[in-house]
Amino acid sequence: MTEANRTRIMSFSLIVGFFLLWEVLCLMLDVSELVLPRPSEIIVTIWDRFPVLWPHILQTLYSTLLGFFLGVSIGVSLGVLVGTSKVAYAVAYPLLVGFSSIPKVAVVPIFVLWFGSGVTPAVLTAMVICVFPIVVNIATGLATTEPELEDVLKTLGASKREILWNVSLPRTMPYFFASLKVAITLSFVGAVLSETVASNMGIGFVMMTASSNFQVSLVFAGLILLAVLGVMLYTIFSVLERRVTGWATRGNDIAIT
Amino acid sequence: MKYAVELQNASVVFGSGDKAVTALSPTTLKMSPGDFVALVGPSGCGKSTILRLVSNLIKPTTGAILLGGREPAAKQLRIGMAFQNPTMLPWLTIEQNVMLPLKIVEPFKRTFHQDRKGAFRDRVHALLAQVGLRDFAGHYPWQLSGGMLQRSNLCRALVHEPDLLLLDEPFGALDQFTREELWQILQTLYLDRKPTVLLVTHDLREAGYLAKRICVMSARPGRVISDEAVSIPQPRDIGIIYDPAFVEMTQGLRELIAQVRSEEPSND
């Protein structure tokens, strides 16, 4: 058995073990379903209510992905602008840090105020929450590109654009993909957050409604669905990262973490 | 006749005012096409500055540089440069690294997309075979040893058949055996194509073995203080570095450099 396979089996056992322990402890301590439902009850709820839950899952995914792609587009453009000029990097950095340290929860009420409740604030929250990690990573990657690597192209008479495409951007890819993994998870958090505050669709809304109706196992069903979706989104970008930037990890088969 | 490389009283000053540092005193240097000049001198004397001037990475503060009779920006000459560090791009394979100049430099870049899987690849593979890296084309830089990287570095400097080859201590960090082997490879490649070569080096035997002319530079701020032809005909056998006449020549250079080092001003 390879090292990687053993790690995978252990990860899987840990997850199964966690839910088993949860189940057993609930049974042993006779925990009320209204406080903490057992995993088996949650799975049954997901199964029974799946036709109802499905549109909400799609809605949350839609808001997340749309916000994410908008955020990535804006983040990459801003990052390239800021990162390719030393002056712009130095000037813009304090403002970027300031923006990125605002808790993004705080912007949800503003979006609701401007656009009303629904899909728009969810998409916008997903967007703003993921822009800054991308800007900062792209800008850092570009700004820290070794001048020696650029010199190789400069001596060949390469234009600024050729240097950007052949050296700076490929050099920045590991930073970019590292930020994408963070950004997709953040977008997901942002979309759900906005749904719980002001929406009539999405998993966040389902959980909020279920909570006010004391449908505790449905609340937990939403939670489990969020976790599964989050892991799926993260995995997609991890795999993509390994495909594109394998050179940076020197081709090691790193287990998805 | 047009010189391949001509420095006309070129000087370089970094910074300004009180913090100005003169990296190169006004220097005049002329190289005919096909010439092989080695620049030697104490460290910090401005040898690399001359290379950076000629490769158009920096501009002279005063004076002028002409390549093939024109401004460097006119790209009259195709330039190939090998740096002291191999500076292979880590995300590209050795083959892709060596092929890089063909993607950037005219006229190759025009047909790059058609030829990169055909004619250009054959050219890269032939060059890699010539330096003993035939089986490493698909490897990434981190999978190769220092000597192998320097060989690929040399290939990348030569792949676009430059008219002017600039070498900045390309064999500095290598052991003696690898170095001598690469000297011979470089000599063969040079005699094959006869580009104009400007080699910056600390190693006097390297200069004597490879170059047609050796220019000695003074301590910082540097200028050329001696310009001697090496009379031994090419191709030279690696054994000549133990020949009494050769040893005498390098000894002479050694003493000259020791002398200019001792004249080095104590402050800048």
Image: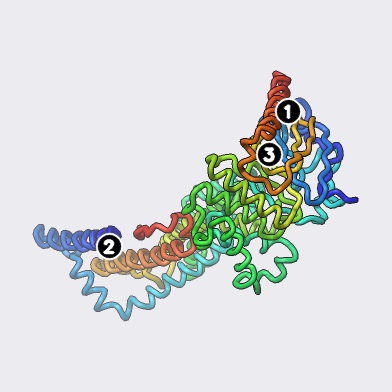
What residue would you read off at disc 2? A5
Say if residue A183 shows up in the picture: yes
| Count of numbered marks | 3
Q: Chain of mark 1?
A: B
Instruction: Report the side of B23 relative to A24 (left or right).
Output: right
Near mark 3 (Cα within 10 A), the count class, few <14, some 14-19 or many ≥20, is many
Whether tag 2 and tag 1 are in contact, CB under 8 A, the answer is no
Occupied quadrant, residue B203 = top right
Where is residue B60? Give x, y as percent.
80, 40
Near mark 1 (Cα within 10 A), the count class, few <14, some 14-19 or many ≥20, is many
Where is residue B126? Give x, y as percent.
60, 64
Q: Nearer the viewer, mark 2 or mark 1?
A: 1
What is the CA distance from the residue labelled 3 to the residue labelled 2? 56 Å
What residue would you read off at disc 1? B220
What residue would you read off at disc 3? B207
Q: Amino acid at mark 3?
A: Ala
For residue A204, which numbered disc appears in the image?
none
User: Who's the residue at 42% across and 73% down the image?
Assistant: A59
Are the residues under badges 2 and 1 in a single subunit?
no
Q: Chain of mark 3?
A: B
- Against A15, is A137 above or below? above
Near mark 2 (Cα within 10 A), the count class, few <14, some 14-19 or many ≥20, is few
User: Who's the residue at 38% across and 73% down the image?
Assistant: A57
User: Who's the residue at 76% across and 45% down the image?
Assistant: B54
